[in-house]
Amino acid sequence: MRVAVFADIEGSFGIWRMRQCKTGTGEWQYGRECLTEDVNRVIKGAFDAGAKSVFVKDTHDTGFNCIRKSLDPRAEYIGGHYIKPTFFGDVLDCDLALYVGIHAASGTEGAFFPHTHFGIFSDVRINGRVVSEMDVYGGYLGEFGIPVGFVSGEDIAVKQAAESLPWAESVVVDKKKGAYTSGEKSVEYLRKGRRQLEEKAAVAVENISRMKPLILEGPLHFEVTLRSEKLLGKYNSWDFPRKDLTVEWESKNMIEGFDNFNKLTFFPKKVYPFRRQLLFFMRSYYRIKNGYFYPKPNDEGAVRLSDAK
């Protein structure tokens, strides 16, 4: 059994503010430590439950957030974004995906850094229904036959994921500062939380037979509302149909729909013919930059990870 551990950062234990998710800051370097520790626990749970191989797919921002030298050496690592065979790279031999550190959908009131795929949207809908990244990414992976069997993150994000992935195991992560800056109380919270990551990941792998690929039956009508007219002018280079600040398109399935989503967010019309070269350059650049040139971590008074082993 080959298991993929997909890694976002906002829903990690230890993280409570946006700057800890912003690439290149000292707070982000601390956030990377938090994410890497969460991922390691999920890797361990997967192997303990019988996985024969595990790889980590880093999905936040540039796709190079986990600290590779600190990752469980048994796991492979895929950083950055791709075109073929999927946006996530060559993940087609994966039997099950476990998603660490998810966040709530664009427009979710009171949530920690809510967004869907990119931070420019105030609302993302498919066939009239508000969707989160677990709908978009889960549906995309589902069409390749890959089920999502585990999620961890903020309570509202986990609830949103459960609407589409009711079979998935889950762990809820507190996003309040006090959860991580209260001395021994925080140490104990982290110990329990990360133990849960390990245990629930193992349960998901052990019960792979009940995990289902998420299939959103086509045709699919996408509606994405941008936050401002300026953003709309900047990103809608493909001239998708629009109503006010909302851009729309029809797709026969999630693979096609997700490709259009990426045209809107990452690949302007002038850049599209060179997208492979662009992504290759970005992967190479951030692999080096985030692997060797990074700031000293600023934990802002949080308990040290070593205290919560």
Image (cartoon, rainbow, N blue to C red):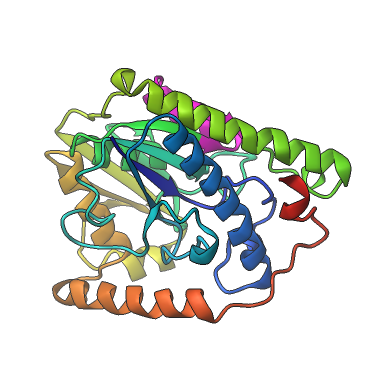
Left or right: 43, with 37 as reference point:
left
**Is residue 159 within the magenta segment?**
yes
Q: Is residue 98 above or below residue 37?
A: above
Q: Residue at x 45, y 62 (%)?
A: 61
**Res 105 seen here:** no
Q: How many numbered tags mark residues here? A: 0
On the image, which quarter does residue 218 sit in? top left
**Res 162 seen here:** yes
- On the image, the x and y values in percent for residue 186 come to 81, 42
Quarter holding the N terminus is top left
Q: Which residue appears farthest toward the top when viewing the image?
A: 210
- On the image, the x and y values in percent for residue 195 come to 63, 34
- On the image, the x and y values in percent for residue 122 come to 47, 49
In this view, the residue in front, 36 or 240, is: 36
**Is residue 26 within the magenta segment?**
no
On the image, which quarter does residue 213 sit in? top left
Q: Residue at x 41, y 63 (%)?
A: 63
Left or right: 45, with 211 as reference point:
right
Quarter holding the C terminus is top right
Q: Which residue appears farthest toward the right when viewing the image?
A: 183
Q: Which residues are magenta?
A: 152-172
Q: Residue at x 43, y 29 (%)?
A: 49
- On the image, the x and y values in percent for residue 60 come to 45, 58
Q: Is residue 293 above or below residue 63?
A: below
Q: Is residue 25 above or below residue 4?
A: below
Q: Residue at x 20, y 44 (%)?
A: 93
